[in-house]
Image: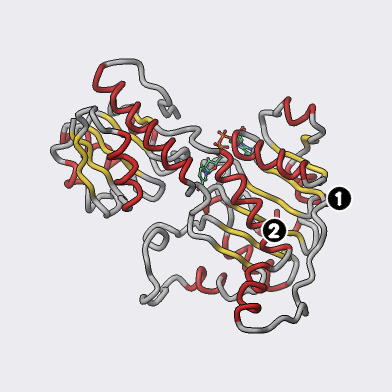
Amino acid sequence: MLVAVFSTQPYDREHLERAAAGTGIAWRWFDSRLDADTVALAADATAVNCFVNDDLNAAVLERLRDFGVRLVTLRCAGFNQVDVPAAARLGLPVVRVPEYSPHAVAEHAVGLVLMLDRRLHKAYNRVREGNFSLDGLLGFDLHGRTVGVVGTGRIGGRFAEIMLGFGCRVLAHDPRENAVLASRGVRFVTLAELLAESDIVSLHCPLTPATHHLIDADRIALMKPGAMLVNTSRGGLVDTRAVIAGLKTGHLGHLGLDVYEEEAGLFFDDKSDAIIRDDVFARLLTFPNVVVTAHQAFFTRNALEAIAAQTVRNLVHFERGEPLEAVVTA
Ligand code: NAI
């Protein structure tokens, strides 16, 4: 079976090749994103394999189907980049990797919290330049602080448990209450209550039409003055212009982002010699109390191995006509 792999990075190739040894899967590697301009690259493939910033809209899916592609595999958990109802209409199954390492993402979110709180990004540079002053590095104890977790599935649940370990009071908001977390003392509240009471808010819900710009100007206004916002889920959950306004007035005290709503075409590539043309993103980078990582929360050895193993399993099941695991449904 020939699989066209889009948005390929060297580490994807290494892990997928290793996981597929002996299966007969043939890979064709493309570093470009899958979109309307590149879809023809999949013309003779049986399956495609995509990542977070590929664009699987209805027109792209239709062309894949017309080329004879029979399966869409995602090497990620989120599937907001796929028009799932269109894929269903076209009879194209979409499979993903729902649980490769919730620890990887939750731990990265905690890393952003600690970095912002203790100004580690500033301290690192300062000490390297021989500046051992502590002025401006004053942080706060996490112990005793209130942390709000939006979305308590696999990743948010893990994040909540870690924050309980720090001695934080944890509030959560999720349409499906997580009974295990509730039994450990996490209190499920409305989003408005969570925003009003939390010193730190961390987003772990999926991006859907209902959650697009979940954090907008009105919701930022509900947050405690000086609160911290962390987003390791999907960029579209946050209205970036609104958070910039909140940072400028000082109402928002700290911002940690691993995802950005316009990250496609920016993240995952070395742009160090390029001019950044996105003025909104460039403005974000000017704040001393903002830390941005380029969608790296998933990026651990354990996660890459698990992603490759599940992706190969998905392809092998399809080829053998066995029931598919991890099918995405609307
Ligand atoms: P999950 O499906 O286990 O949990 C998502 C939770 O969000 C569910 O409990 C669901 O009920 C809840 N939810 C849905 N709508 C909500 C709303 N309006 N308000 C509050 N909660 C809501 O998903 P998992 O594995 O925990 O992943 C969460 C998200 O993390 C993914 O959708 C993906 O976008 C993102 N992610 C980011 C990565 C990164 O590298 N930065 C890597 C992997 C996932």
Q: Position of residue 161 (x, y in %)?
A: 72, 38
- Sequence-wise first label, 2 or 1: 2
* The furthest residue to the bottom: 130
Residue lying at 61% horizontally and 45% vertically, measured from the top left: 106
Specify the quadrant that holds the C terminus: top left
Give, as a three-letter code, the residue at label 2: Leu
10 Å crowding of disc 1: few (<14), some (14-19), many (20+): few
- 185 vs 42, left or right, is right
Q: Residue at 24% of width from left, 37% of height from top?
A: 62
For residue 133, which quarter of the picture? bottom right
CB contact under 8 Å: marks 2 and 1: no
Relative to 312, residue 281 above or below: below
Q: Which of 172/288 is in front?
A: 288
Residue 57 visible somewhere in the drawing: no
Residue 255: horizontal and vertical position, in percent? Answer: 65, 62
Q: Does residue 137 appear in this view?
A: yes
Residue extending furthest toward the top: 322
Per the rendering, the mark at residue 144 is 1
Judged from the image, the secondary structure of the residue bearing numbered disc 1 is loop
Residue, far left: 44
Classify residue 229 as left or right of residue 277. Answer: right
The label shown at residue 114 is 2
Secondary structure under the numbered disc 2 in the rendered image: helix
Distance from disc 2 to disc 1, alpha carbons, whole Å, reads 15 Å
Quadrant of the frame with the N terminus: top left
Displayed-image quarter of ligand 1: top right
Residue 188 x %, y % = 77, 35
Q: Amino acid at mark 1?
A: Gly
Q: Position of residue 286 (x, y in %)?
A: 58, 76
